[in-house]
Image: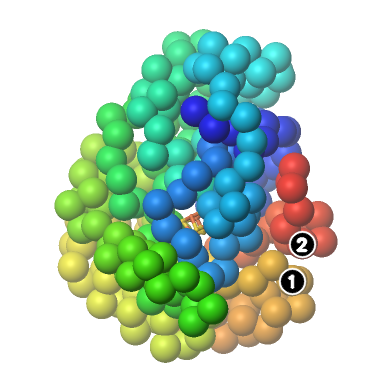
Amino acid sequence: MRVAEIYESIQGEGFLTGTPSVFLRASGCNLRCGYCDTPYASWEPEGDDLSVEEIVDQVLQRDVRHVVVTGGEPMLFAELIPLCRELVTQGRHVTIETAGTLMLPVPCQLMSISPKLSNSDPGPQADARWRRRHQKNRFAPAVMRRLVNEYPYQVKFVVDRPEDLEEVDRYLADFPEISRDRVMIMPQGTEPVSLALTGTWLQPYCRQHGFRYCPRMQVEWFGGVTRGT
Ligand code: SF4
């Protein structure tokens, strides 16, 4: 499995915000979001191919209970199954970060799903084949259903403009099995100023509609999205 980075930090989003964790970033993605903040694991994947044993060894060297397996899209890699099985066996709490378009029967304690709305489009400058592929693959309802039915989960939507909220509503209308108190809405952006600006209308909306507002604390703590944070 190709790995872009393994590092220790603190979870900045979701139910486990503030939890010290080891982050394992798989390199490679089936999507190409225009706002992707880890292009080195999607648009231009970097990193070495490591065996399951090598990865487990590097993770277990750290005396940290929580492990976040992120990407890229980690569900692209079948090695994730034995990898997560071993981490769970070794007493680690495993969170998988996925866009919810691919399914693997991975053992984990939390499935953290970030469905991609139309605002994730790669943009006009992107290769036309990737734009088509992204559009075709970003919504996989059967996979989404399995993930929320088979795992403890959280669902995080990335919102850029007020119009995106109508799309969130339409999305959730298709999934009555998704519990609203597990839905988080997160402002798009990697700069504290733009996140704060979006928060001025998004936070009141979340309060009024029973969603959790999900700040991106890693941007506040580390001043932006940088590798190793
Ligand atoms: S799914 Fe995630 S890693 Fe893949 S392109 Fe989109 S934001 Fe980047």
- The answer to whether residue 184 is visible is no
For the point 34% across and 84% down, the residue is: 166
For residue 96, side relative to residue 78 (left or right): right
Q: Secondary structure at mark 1?
A: loop
Asked if the residues shown at circle 1 and circle 2 are in contact, with their CB atoms under 8 angstroms apart, the answer is yes
The numbered disc on residue 191 is 1
Disc sitting over residue 227 in the figure = none
The amino acid on which the numbered mark 1 sits, given as a three-letter code, is Glu
Q: Is mark 1 within 8 Å of ligand 1?
A: no
Q: Which mark is residue 224?
A: 2
On the image, the x and y values in percent for residue 187 come to 57, 72
Q: Position of residue 6 (x, y in %)?
A: 67, 32
Q: Residues within 10 Å of mark 2 (few under 14, many from 20)?
A: some
Tell me the crowding category of disc 1: few under 14, some 14 to 19, or many 20 or more residues within 10 angstroms, Cα based: some
Residue at point 68% right, 83% down?
A: 197
Residue under the point 26% across and 52% down: 144
The image shows residue 47, relative to residue 211, as above or below, that is above
Report how far apart the C-alphas of labels 1 and 2 lie in the structure.
6 Å
Residue found 47% across the figure and 87% down from its top = 162
Q: Is residue 186 left or right of residue 194?
A: left
In this orientation, which residue lies closer to the viewer: 226 or 87? 226
Frontmost residue, 220 versus 25: 25
Q: Position of residue 211 (x, y in %)?
A: 42, 68
Q: Quadrant of residue 157?
A: bottom left
> What is the x, y in percent for residue 99?
40, 53
State the colouring used for the structure image: rainbow
**Which of the marked residues, 1 or 2, is nearer the chain's N terminus?**
1
